């Protein structure tokens, strides 16, 4: 089963890159606003902006991005990363944490989907990919999704499928990746997940100011 999934994923990636390479007249879409202006305070969460090493940005090929560690006065914490790609025609495809995190020494011990319900937001509910990661005695939760061309996508396969379709129909290959990470404190995964979802509910209405629909 593992070999089959790997084969399908590899074939889909090759097909995606082949289609994008030969697509012409694809628009170069800019973010609605520069991510350098992304708010450092979201509700009661106060952030400190961070940056990856230059080598990481070179590898992921992102055009604009934002990395920030948010905390609250009572000690809750979450790291937010947003990567925006103006075009994915030249092989700079969005990277999945399923590939990147093991390279940083984290073991993925569980993968699932989570539903996030956001009152007074369109859409009112979205699916998120959840990873439980472990490195030695440390454990953390990752929530992420792909937000591209008006869609919220919780599947690497669908992300690549829509990328090919939209390059043909919409002449667009722009896309973004949104990731939240939080350490599991005192072994309480449910409480950590709840805190992350609370932050995500505040985050979602802000994203359209930066990510084109």
Image (cartoon, rainbow, N blue to C red):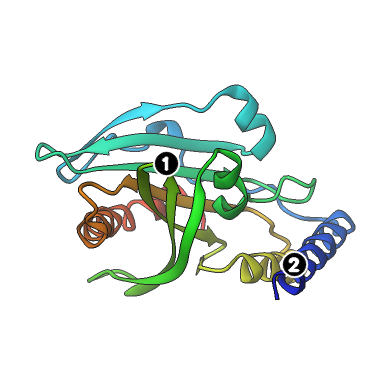
Choose the circle earlier in sequence order: 1 or 2: 1
Q: How many marks?
A: 2
- In depth, the one of 46 and 186 nearer the eye is 186
Q: Residue at x 65, y 69 (%)?
A: 157
Q: How busy is the neighbourhood of tag 1: few (under 14 within 10 Å), some, or many (20 plus)?
A: few
Residue farthest along the front direction in this orientation:
136
Q: Is residue 117 above or below residue 101?
A: below
Q: Quadrant of residue 208?
A: bottom left
- The x, y position of residue 153, in whole percent, is 52, 68
Q: Does residue 190 show up? A: yes
97 on left or right of 169: left
Q: Is mark 1 in CB contact (under 8 Å) with mark 2? A: no
Residue at x 62% of width, y 46% of height:
85
Q: Position of residue 52 (x, y in %)?
A: 51, 28
176 left or right of 42 in image: right
**Residue shown at 85%/56% (left/top)?**
24
Q: Position of residue 98 (x, y in %)?
A: 57, 55
Q: Residue at x 70, y 76 (%)?
A: 1
Do we see residue 123 in this rendering?
no
Residue 164, label in figure: 2
Q: Secondary structure at mark 2?
A: helix
Please state if 138 lies on the left or on the right of 95 as rendered.
left
Residue 136 tag number: 1
Q: Quadrant of residue 16?
A: bottom right
Residue 62 pos. (x, y %): 62, 39
Q: Nearer the viewer, mark 1 or mark 2?
A: 1
Return the mark for residue 127.
none
Cα separation between marks 1 and 2: 39 Å
């Amino acid at each position: 089963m593992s070999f089959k999934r790997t084969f399908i994923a590899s074939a889909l990636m090759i097909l995606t890159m082949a289609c994008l390479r030969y697509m012409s007249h694809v628009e170069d879409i800019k973010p609605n606003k520069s991510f350098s202006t992304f708010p450092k305070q979201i509700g009661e969460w106060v952030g400190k902006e961070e940056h990856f090493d230059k080598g990481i940005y070179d590898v992921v090929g992102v055009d604009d991005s934002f990395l920030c560690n948010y905390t609250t006065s009572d000690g809750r914490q979450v790291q937010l990363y947003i990567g925006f790609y103006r075009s994915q025609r030249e092989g700079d495809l969005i990277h999945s944490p399923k590939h990147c995190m093991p390279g940083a020494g984290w073991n993925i011990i569980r993968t699932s989907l989570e539903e996030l319900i956001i009152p007074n937001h369109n859409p009112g509910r979205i699916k998120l990919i959840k990873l439980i990661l472990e490195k030695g005695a440390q454990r953390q939760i990752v929530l992420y999704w792909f937000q591209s061309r008006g869609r919220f996508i919780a599947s690497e396969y669908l992300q690549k499928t829509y990328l090919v379709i939209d390059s043909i129909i919409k002449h667009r290959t722009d896309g973004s990746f949104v990731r939240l990470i939080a350490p599991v404190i005192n072994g309480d995964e449910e409480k950590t997940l709840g805190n992350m979802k609370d932050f995500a509910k505040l985050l979602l209405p802000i994203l359209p100011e930066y990510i084109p629909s």
